[in-house]
Amino acid sequence: MTHPEQRPGIRMDELPLGVRPCSIAAALDVLGERWSLLALREIGYGVHRFARIAGYTGASRDILADRLRKLETAGVIERRQYSEHPPRHEYHLTAAGRELFPVMLALRQWGDKWAVDAPAITHRHACGQPVQIDLTCHHCGRPVTHDTIHAELADA
């Protein structure tokens, strides 16, 4: 294991002070509100209709409508009409929304460990075992940890 001082790359704490352009900040602009993430949780569970999403999340109708519009505008979900009279829509994950699955699992895993006394739900893999998210490098297969990565400025 290398120590931070020995890692290649740049030291982020030594760059000139200023607001950093950041993919995390951009993602939080889309996803960083409680009701957005809870709506995505429900849609991921197969709950597609507005009233049921509101009921399972506890979000007010106005706030939920706003968050769903924002997620739709960002391309994370799509509305599909299921009734013409009166007009009613369901909400479904797009490819971008489905790619949030590992993020949601990791957030749940963190919450189970650090934010609640006992988890309300256990997620199990098809093999029957509880799901445990582990990050591994796709290239070498070794664990990805804070100590095994370094930052580099992206090519412009």
Image (cartoon, rainbow, N blue to C red):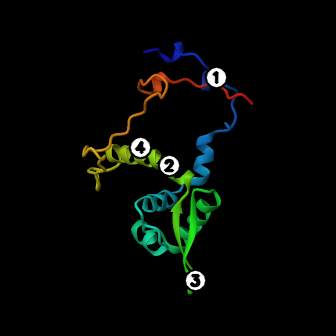
**Disc marking residue 84:** 3
Question: Looking at numbered disc 4 in the image, what kind of residue is underneath it?
Answer: Ala
- Local SS, label 3: loop
Q: Earlier in the sequence, mark 3 or mark 1?
A: 1
Q: Check disc 2 and give the amino acid type.
A: Leu
Front-lying residue, 95 or 18: 95
Tag 1–tag 2 contact (CB < 8 Å): no
Residue 70, given in percent of the width and then of the height, sits at 61, 62
Residue marked by disc 2: 100
Give residue 106's position: percent from left, percent from top: 41, 43
Amino acid on which the number 3 mark rests in the picture: Glu
In the picture of the structure, the residue carrying the numbered disc 4 is 106
Q: Nearer the viewer, mark 4 or mark 3?
A: 3
The quarter of the image holding the C terminus is top right
In this rendered view, identify the residue nearer to me: 130 or 67: 130
Q: Residues within 10 Å of mark 2 (few under 14, many from 20)?
A: some
Marks 3 and 1, how far apart in space? 58 Å
Q: Residues within 10 Å of mark 1 (few under 14, many from 20)?
A: few
For badge 1, the amino acid type reads Glu
Circle 4 — which element?
helix
The residue tagged 1 is: 14
Badge 4 crowding class, 10 Å Cα cut-off, few under 14, some 14 to 19, many 20 or more, is some
Residue beneath the point at 29% across and 55% down: 121
**Residue 113 makes an appearance in the image:** yes
